[in-house]
Amino acid sequence: MKPTNPFAFGVWLLVLLCPLAWAEPFGGALMYQGRLTDAEHPSNGVYDLRFALFDAAAGGGQAGTSLTNQSVYVTNGLFAVELDFGPGAFDGTRYWLEIGVRTNGDANPYTTLAPRQPVSPAPYAIFAGGVDGSGVVGTISDTKLSTNVVRLDGDRIFSGQVRFLNPSNLFSGAFAGSGSELVGLRTTNLTGTLTTTNPVVRGTIRYGTDIASITDYVTNNIPAAPILGMIRRSLYAPNDVRGQTNWCTILRSPITFFGEYVTSVNPTGYPTSASTDFVFGFEGSSLVVYLRGNGSSMGIEIDGADDLSRVYTPPDGNFHFWTVTFSSWGRRQIRLRLSNYQFGGIYHSPESGLWPAVLPKTHRVIVVGDSISEDTGSTGWTTYLMSLFWNLDVWPSAVGSTGYLNPGTVGRVNFQDRILADVVPNRPDYVVFAGGINDNTITTNSTAADALRDACLNCYRIIQTNLPNCKIIVLGPFWPRTPDTPSIYRVNGAISNACFSAGIISNYVDTLADPWVTGIWHQPGSGNAVHYTSPDGTHPTSAGAWNIAYHVAAELARRFPDLQPREKVR
């Protein structure tokens, strides 16, 4: 046996896939994927793998202890393991990974693979969490300092802006000037007589340069608000207008539902001054924020920079619709920083787009699908797909139990009805249709198959009409087992016929003729379903999600050379 691993050291640090707002320490765990071959043929079976770090490509000394992963399933040569050498393993030293392999349960020594794999820079990001600056020593002489740097030996005049952000800063002495340029001053810190021209402080206090205006429409009659024809997105509730919950990242304090609003809460269930941040991507020139008048405040952060935009809603019990108009039409990452709030969501025009909280990469693909394609906390195949490319953002428009024609459960909508709201406004470069399994139950005869074909063709035509430069990839229905059923063949035929009519048959991937999953999950030896399909018999395991991601990545990379895979995909 001659096991080899032709892959470069492919590592994704799982902590880097999580939102950065949680102040949790980095761990030492990383995910390693590789390919194992036996006499140049992909291996299949269960193996014991041993991993160790060395400080040289050959010879050298071992760092720390070896990690042994027993009973690792290898399918078609592919395997994935989690390695944790401890939080102090990657301290800036250059390492090589040595891998040993043997058949599971074999008493013989491990066979060491050669050459050792160099560790890429990615794991050293773990080291950043432990840097304490103790290595920075020495003194900078006065001659090396600018003349307008504060020193202890004299007065300094600063012509530029000086900002003091620490609330513990102390100042003494007299203040000269009118104070007209002061912002963020708390009146509780003032003494003496205060004269104001507007004794009721409310409304917009200030906003940054990327915001042209913020206006408040106050009403007790919601239909009278300036929201006619707009799309409402709750950002927090599962009954969002499109059944989506993955358009927004909710950070910081807990929230609770209160009628049509969401409120921040403390353990007693009452509103609190603790803030919650709603982070999402937005493309457009304006949006409307819906707040109840209960004394709440709102900050607006754009593309990760707090420009100190602040809005205050008086405790008047009315409905406040804040129209935020930006300096120009564009793509931005928006962070709404709400305190003591009752938040009713946002409104935007149908031409505007909303997406998850990521800054756009060069290329964008939207996956239209069902629950198999839903992203569940960085473990769905769409997230894995994005990790396989350098320059591709992957956004799932996936809703469980839906199909091209099947709307699923009450309150959800099928693929046709999601295209105009979820796909067209976001102007993707590519659209991947990954569904059809839920249409299986309603495609019982040839007449139903014709109706399904028309629904598929309508989806493709909408994109071709509104986004003529967008490329469409259509996957046959994901069938999590073999053999197939007659109805799923009718679904497959309806989808392929629609692709032929739309002129995109070359971008149709028949997942039944060349199945990605074989066998039945609870029958060992029947196929790879035992590893790729979860016990519910339908949805993929983590390994199954990687299996889908690798297949889709290969289909994209083969057709579109502008996409840059991080590694060779099959």
Image: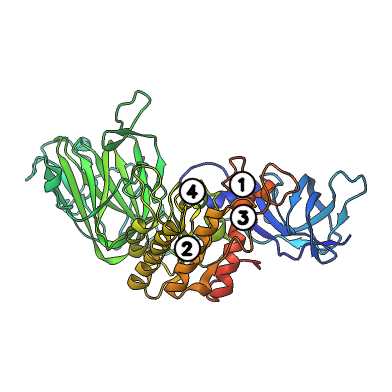
Looking at the image, is 529 positioned above or below residue 427? Answer: above
For the C terminus, the quadrant is: bottom right
Judged left or right of residue 437, residue 204 is: left
Q: Residue furthest top?
A: 268
Query: Disc 3 to disc 2, how far (Cα)?
Result: 27 Å
Residue 394 appears anywhere in the view: yes
Instruction: Answer with mark 4 or mark 2, whichever residue precedes in sequence.
Output: 4
Which of the two residues, 68 or 377, is positioned nearer the viewer here?
377
Q: Which residue is mark 2?
A: 494
Judged left or right of residue 483, residue 231 is: left
Instruction: Answer with mark 3 or mark 2, whichever residue precedes in sequence.
Output: 2
Q: Amino acid at mark 3?
A: Trp
Count neighbours of disc 3 (C-alpha within 10 A) and say few if under 14, some if 14 to 19, many if 20 or more: many
Query: Disc 3 to disc 4, how far (Cα)?
Result: 16 Å
Q: Which residue is mark 4?
A: 371
Instruction: Answer with mark 3 or mark 1, whichever residue precedes in sequence.
Output: 1
For the N terminus, the quadrant is: bottom right
Q: Secondary structure at mark 1?
A: loop
Q: Secondary structure at mark 4?
A: helix
